[in-house]
Image (cartoon, rainbow, N blue to C red):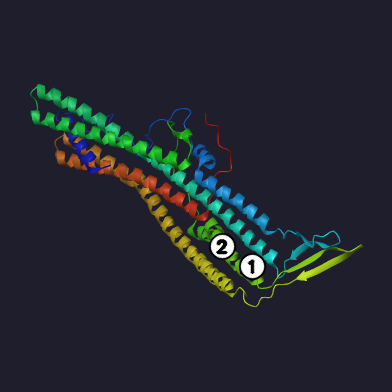
Amino acid sequence: MPTRLLITLLLTTAVATVSAQPVVPPDSNVPESPTAQATAIHRPSSDALSLDDILGLAAQANPILRGARADVDASAGTLMQAGTRPNPELSFLQEGFGGTERTSTALVNQTIELGGKRRARLDVASYGREAALATLEDRDAALRSQVIAAFYELLAAQRQLQVAEDAAAIAARSADIAEKRTRAGKVSPVEATKAHVASVGVQIERDNAKIRVDSAAEKLQNATGSDALRGRAVAGDLESVPEAEPLSALVARLNDSPLSRAAKAEMLRANAAISVERAKRIPDVTVSAGIKRVIAGSVRDNQAVVGISIPLPLFDTNKGAILEASHKAQSALAAMDAESAALRMALVQAYASFESSAREVQRLKTDVLPAARGALDAMSRGYELGKFSFLDVLDAQRTLFEQQSRYVQSLAAVHLAYAELGRLVGTPMPGVAAHAIK
């Protein structure tokens, strides 16, 4: 919770406790347990969308994912085209146009590819299709991570809004009490002014929290690419901390992750391109067969014609293209090694963030929040009995509110880190069909 909100809330609570009333009202935003506070979010309607619903919508509507699917379909066409053979050619030659002296030749020419050109093209196209499929899976895993992160950011924003609304309600009641006691002459008018200023400040914070909720909802809608989310409530459990596999198991899965497979496919495609360029050094043979009709005076004669054509590789031996393909293959190998190292580092960092956030959530929930709440209760009772100063009570309140806000932030961090782990190892979107959204 922002410091300004804490200070204003503490001031309003101070005014409300000028009399012998308890410092913390029974219906304030201080929960009876940390768990109760953690679950205080907007209650969703019966048609609220779950995370699986939203993931299903994203799988259908996200434009980036649709583009990746189109690339996979295009790679199928590339593979199909790579396996085609050269078309035959039909040629006709007419010599002389006189009625008694002319020669007509009709030929069918067929180029025969040598040197394994077709096989090499198929290898390049096949590895290209593997790269496209791996890229599609990576986009799928990245979209899943993005949607999950946006979903829990929205839940966290809703939780903070609830806290702000509770604080605004307390501030309003405190301002009313201060105003009544001022009119009764029991406290200075300054106290009523302070309470009013504090109430307005908390209301501003509440309005800002509403804006953050709207922004988070828009971010989630943008991640899915579907307008079906607009104006719809979401339902989820922010406090449920997921369990992650051991780091060693996740590292072992990196070799089969979409990013790793895409980099490997690109490296294999670059190597296959060398074979394509080397095969071009071997000239193709063109064979011809046809018939020649000769008319000389009154004599007509038909003759069979066969031929063969072979280019002579005297000047162009394709050395430059082979050299280029070789260096591109080295670049692809280096890119694959760099991608592997980057993936491992990102995984280690995401796992460390997940573990630290999960430990923080557990400590806050089981130790810090109960202790802070107990300290505030003790300070409140002691203040009523005159054993503590009000500054002690304010300090206890500030500590509790700060830790409550930190608890929500840690919960959000856990889910974001867990989503990042899923992206890195390539966890796919749910394979179930999305529910129909009316």
* Location of residue 255 (image quadrant): bottom right
Quick one: quadrant of the N terminus? top left
Task: Identify the residue at the far right of this view.
Answer: 299
Indicate which disc residue 154 carries.
none
Task: Identify the residue at the far bottom of this view.
Answer: 314
Residue wearing tag 1: 276
Indicate which disc residue 266 carries.
2
Q: Is residue 48 left or right of residue 103?
A: left
Q: Is residue 395 left or right of residue 373?
A: left
In this view, the residue in front, 352 or 89, is 89
Q: Position of residue 142 (x, y in %)?
A: 49, 50
* Type of amino acid at the residue the image marks with label 1: Val
Please report the residue visible at 53 percent of the width from the left and 50 percent of the height from the top: 427
Q: Is residue 408 shown to the viewer in this render?
A: yes
Please report the residue visible at 30 percent of the width from the left and 37 percent of the height from the top: 209
Q: Is residue 413 above or below residue 337?
A: above
Please report the residue visible at 49 percent of the width from the left and 52 percent of the height from the top: 423
Please report the residue visible at 47 percent of the width from the left and 40 percent of the height from the top: 225
